[in-house]
Amino acid sequence: MLLQYTALAAVSCASLAIMLALIHENARMKPASKKRLYLTYGAIMLTNIIEAISLWLNGAPAWTRGLHLAIKGLDYCMTPLVGFLFVRQIQHEGKWSRPLLGLLSANVFLQAISFFTGWVYYVDADNYYHHGSLYLLYVLVYGTMMIFAAWQFILYSRRFKSSNRLSLQMILLFVMAGIAAQEIIGARVINVTLAIGAILLFIHNNEYVQQVNDDTISQQQTQLETDALTGMKSRFAYTKVLNALHQPELMPEDTVVFMIDINGLKQVNDRFGHSAGDELIRGVAQCISEVFSPFGECYRTGGDEYVVILHGLAADRVPELCKKLIRIVGGWRGELVQRASVSFGYACANEYPNKSIEELISVADERMYWRKAHYYKTTGHDRRRR
C-alpha cells in the first residue's frame, strides 16, 4: 500500500512537472497567468511529496517524531491552500480573497499550536499519526475552502458557452469525488485527484482561450470584410474575391459583374454637406443590395463606386435586374437628399469566355462610364462637379 501510494505520488509530480514545462514554454500566456499556475501546480506537487513522506514516517524510529509532527502540520496547512490557489486560477482577484487568506492564516496558526498541544493532530509514542480533539476545526477550514472553490467554479462556468460547461462541471465533480473518497472511506487519493484536476482545468482553459481567439479573429475578419458606412462587403473583401477568381478557369461560366457609380455625388456634397453625401451613399447601397444580394455579393470599392459579382444567374435575367435597379434607385428618398441616380455597366462571362474577372470588370466599367457620360450630356451637369 505504501509503495503503491508513493508510486502514484511520483507519477502525479512528474505529470505536474511536465505541465510546468509546457506553461514555461507557452509564449502566448501572460506572465501573471503563468505565475498563478506555477503556484498552484507547485503547491500540489509539494502536498504530494509531504503526504508521501508522512506515510513513510508512520511507525518510523522515535528520533523522527519531531519531523513527523512538522510534516503533518505542513500537510494540514498546504491542502486548504491548494483549494485557494485553484480559486485564484479562475478568479484572479476578488472580494473574498482577504477573508480566505485570513482563514488560511488562522489555520496555519492552529497547526503551529497543534505541533505542541496535539489539538488537531498528534504522534503517539510509537510514532503513529492520530487526529486530535479539535480535528473538526481543521475539517471546517478545509470544508469551507472546498465549498467556496466549488461555488466559484459554478460561477466561473457561467462565462462559458453551454458546450464548454459540461466538461468544467465534470472536472469539479471529479475533484469533489476524490476528496470525499479520502475523507469518508480513507482512500488516499486527494493529491492525485487534485493533480489530475489541475491538468484537466488547464486543458479546459486552453480550449476556451483558443475558442475566444478564434471568435476574435472571426470578428476582426468580419469587420475587415464589411464596409463601415454601408454594411456592404468592403474593398478588402473585394480584393480577396478577385484573387480567388483571378484565373479564368476558376471563374464560373455564369458569372456576371456590375459596375455602379452614383451620379452627382460631388454636387450633393457641395450643396448639402458630407452628411447628405453619406446618406446618399448608404441609400444607393441599400437599393443595390435589395436588387442583387439574392444572387451574389455587393461591394463598395470606393467613395461612390460599387461592384456586384453574381453567380448562377441566367443571362436573360440581367436586363430585368437592370430595370429593377433603375426603378428602386429612382424611388429612393432620404432625409437630406430627395433623389438618387446611378450609372451602371455589366459584363457576362459567357460573352467573354477567355477573359479574367479583372477584364470582365474592365468591360463593365467602360459601359458604366459610357452611361455616365450620357447622363451628364442629357442633364447638362458639369462632369467636374459629379
Image (cartoon, rainbow, N blue to C red):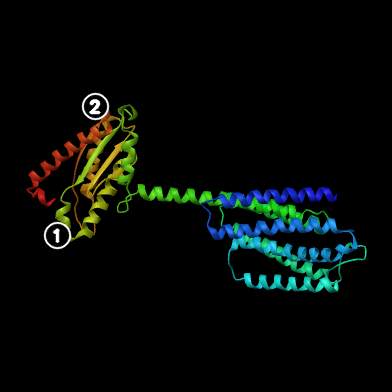
From where the camera sits, is residue 96 visible?
A: no
Residue 270 appears left or right of 177: left
Determine the residue positioned at 21% across, 59% down: 274
Displayed quadrant of residue 137: bottom right
Q: Nearer the viewer, residue 196 or 65?
A: 65
* Residue 125 in the image: above or below residue 29: below
- The residue wearing badge 1 is 271
* Residue 367 in the image: above or below residue 67: above
Say which amino acid is labelled 2: Tyr
Earlier in the chain: of badge 1 and badge 2, it is 1
Give me the disc on residue 78: none
Residue 330 image offset from top left, x and y in percent: 20, 48
SS of the residue at dot 1?
Answer: helix
Residue 24 image offset from top left, x and y in percent: 58, 52
Q: Nearer the viewer, residue 222 or 348?
A: 222
Near mark 1 (Cα within 10 A), the count class, few <14, some 14-19 or many ≥20, is few
SS of the residue at dot 2?
Answer: loop
Q: CA distance from mark 1 to mark 2?
A: 42 Å
Q: Residue furthest front?
A: 63
Determine the residue positioned at 77% across, 73% down: 110
Q: Nearer the viewer, residue 227 or 281?
A: 227
Residue 79 image offset from top left, x and y in percent: 73, 62
Give me the disc on residue 352: 2
Say which amino acid is labelled 1: Arg
Residue 158 image offset from top left, x and y in percent: 58, 58
Near mark 2 (Cα within 10 A), the count class, few <14, some 14-19 or many ≥20, is few
* Residue 237 in the image: above or below residue 255: below
